[in-house]
Image (cartoon, rainbow, N blue to C red):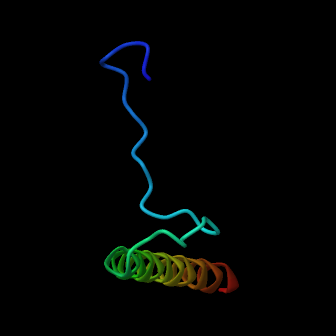
Amino acid sequence: MAIFDDEPRKPASAHVVGQDISLVSVDELSERIGLLKAEIERLEEERAKRGQTKSAAEALFRK
């Protein structure tokens, strides 16, 4: 519980890697899978952006 009402609260995460999922419904599992797939896509896009930036920097310094 927050000491003051105006303190920001940490949002609950939808899934924690390795947590017990034995009591999770099929619908909830499907929802979690969708969230994780979306997160993987977001991470892959960021990795690709960083690779492009790195390649551009390397090309600049090779000249």
Label tally? 0
Does 28 appear above or below 3?
Answer: below
Q: Which of 50 and 54 is in front in this view?
A: 50
Which residue is painted at 42% across and 49% down in the image? 12
Q: Which of 11 and 31 is in front in this view?
A: 31
Q: Residue furthest front?
A: 23
Which residue is painted at 59% across and 85% down in the image? 55
Quadrant for the N terminus, please: top left
Where residue 60 sits: x, y (%)? 59, 80
Which residue is painted at 54% across and 73% down in the image? 22
Where residue 29 sits: x, y (%)? 41, 78
Where residue 3 sits: x, y (%)? 43, 13
Report the side of 9 relative to 49 (left or right).
left
Report the side of 27 relative to 63 (left or right).
left
Q: Which of 39 and 22 is in front in this view?
A: 22
Does 19 appear above or below 45?
Answer: above
Q: Which residue lies furthest to the top in this view?
A: 4
Does 56 appear above or below 9?
Answer: below
Q: Residue furthest right?
A: 62
- Classify residue 63 by image quadrant: bottom right
Where residue 7 sits: x, y (%)? 37, 22
Does 8 appear above or below 38?
Answer: above
- Classify residue 13 by image quadrant: bottom left
